[in-house]
Image (cartoon, rainbow, N blue to C red):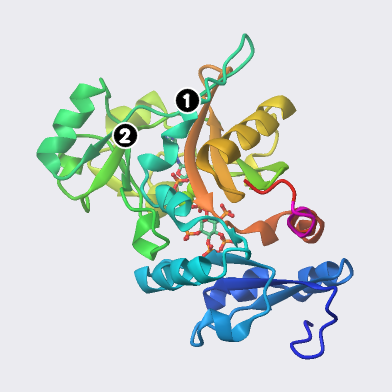
Amino acid sequence: MSEIGGQSPSRHRVGFALEPKKVQSFLQNSLIDHAKNHAIELIPIDLTTAIHQQLPFHSIIHKLHSPQWTQQLRHFSLHNPSIPIIDPPDAVDRLHDRVTMLDSVPKLSLQNDVVSVSVPKQAVANDERTAIEGLDSVNLRFPVIAKPLAADGSASSHNLCLVFDREGLKSLNYPVVVQEFVNHGGAVFKIYVAGRHVTCVRRKSLADITEEEIKNLKGAVPFSQVSNVKGSREQEEEGDGVEMPPEGLVSELGRGLREALGLNLFNVDVIRDANDEKRYLVIDINYFPGYAKLPCYETFFTNFLLDVVHGKNTV
Ligand SMILES: O=P(O)(O)O[C@@H]1[C@@H](OP(=O)(O)O)[C@H](OP(=O)(O)O)[C@H](O)[C@H](OP(=O)(O)O)[C@H]1OP(=O)(O)O
Ligand SMILES: Nc1ncnc2c1ncn2[C@@H]1O[C@H](COP(=O)(O)OP(=O)(O)O)[C@@H](O)[C@H]1O
Ligand SMILES: [Mg+2]
Ligand SMILES: [Mg+2]
C-alpha cells in the first residue's frame, strides 16, 4: 500500500483524480507495489479537498466528468504550471462526443496495399426526420447502429441500438449518431495506448447479421438484447480464432492518434470488415479505459509513468 506520510523526497508522486469505482478497479495493490518498486508513489486525490492542500504531486492523472472538477483542475494548473496534468481537459473533451472523437482518424491517411483504416459512414440525428435525412446524405442503408452522441461516461452513453427500419428510428433517445453496421466476425480489437506504449487485445463483439436476419428483424433492438433475438447466432468467446491485426497497424494507429488527439491515455476499438479483410474501422475511442484488464497492466502502466518521471514522451 502507498505511504501517505514519510515519503522519501526522491519518490515521484502521481495524484489520481478518479471516481471511487475507478480507484478500486485501477489502483490495485499490484500496480501500487510495482510502481513503488520503481520509486513512484500512486496517490488517490481526495475529491472533497482542494488539490493544492494535497501537494506535493509531481504529476496528475484524471478522469472525472463534472464541469466543477475541470474548472478546479484548470485553476490549479494555472497556479502550478510545472506540474504536468495528464491529459489536457480540452483534448479529453473531444472524446466525449462520438463525432469529434473520430475526426482525426481519416486525417491519418493510414492505407497501403494491405490495410486501410477509416471510420464507418455516419450522421448525427436530433430526431426521426433528421435521422432519415442523415442516412440519405451519407447513402446509408439499414441496418444501422444508433449510439448516443454523448460519450460522457454516463450509463446511458453506452445504450446502443441496432436499427432495422424507419420504424426503429422512432424509439431512439436523440441526439444519436446513426452509423453503418459492419459485419466483423464477432471480434473487436482494443488498442491500448499509454504514451509511447501501445498494445492490442481481442475481445468478443456483436455477432454478424445475416441476410436472413436483415429480412426478418424489425424496429430497434437495444444492444444488451441482441444476443437474445431469435435467429441471431451464437458467437465464440473473445472472438477466438479471429486473426489479430498486423503489428504495424496497431503501432501506427496508436502513435498517430496519440499525436493527433494530443492524448497519452486512451484506447481505440477497431473492427475488421468481414467482407473486406483489408478494411479496418475505428468505431470508438475511450479516455483512460480499463487498463487493469490488460495482462501485465502493472508493467505496461508503470513503463508509461517512468517516461513521465524522466520527462520524456508525454504529448
Ligand atoms: O471499467 P472498465 O474497465 O470496463 O473500463 C471501461 C472501458 O472498457 P475497456 O477498457 O474499453 O474494455 C470502456 O470502454 P468501451 O466504451 O466499453 O469500449 C469505457 O472507457 C469506460 O469508460 P466510460 O464509461 O466511457 O467513461 C471504462 O469504464 P471506467 O472504468 O473508466 O468507468
Ligand atoms: N459500426 C459498427 N458496426 C458493427 N458493430 C459495431 C459498430 N459500432 C459498434 N459496434 C459494436 O458495439 C460495441 C459497442 O460500441 P462502441 O461504439 O464501442 O460503444 P461503447 O462506447 O459503448 O463501447 C462494439 O464493441 C462493437 O461490438
Ligand atoms: Mg467501445
Ligand atoms: Mg466507448
- Marker count (numbered): 2
Which element carries disc 1, helix, strand or loop? helix
Badge number at residue 107: 1
Query: Depth-wise, is mark 1 or mark 2 nearer the camera?
Result: 1
For disc 2, the marked residue is 144
The quarter of the image that holds ligand 2 is top left
Q: Identify whether 25 is placed above or below 103.
A: below
Depth check: 35 or 209 in front? 35
Q: Position of residue 201 (x, y in %)?
A: 68, 43
Corner quadrant of residue 251? top right
Question: Which residue lies at the image location 55% right of the left edge and 66% below the top edge?
Answer: 62
Q: What is the spatial separation of the Cα atoms under label 1 and label 2, in whole angstroms? A: 24 Å
Residue 310 included in the magenta stretch of the image: yes
Question: Which residue lies at the image location 33% right of the left edge and 53% below the top edge?
Answer: 150
Identify the amino acid type marked 1.
Answer: Lys
Which callout, 1 or 2, points at the residue further toward the start of the chain?
Answer: 1
Q: Is residue 19 left or right of residue 218?
A: right
Residue 154 included in the magenta stretch of the image: no
Q: Is residue 248 left or right of residue 179?
A: right
Q: Identify whether 61 is placed above or below 213.
A: below
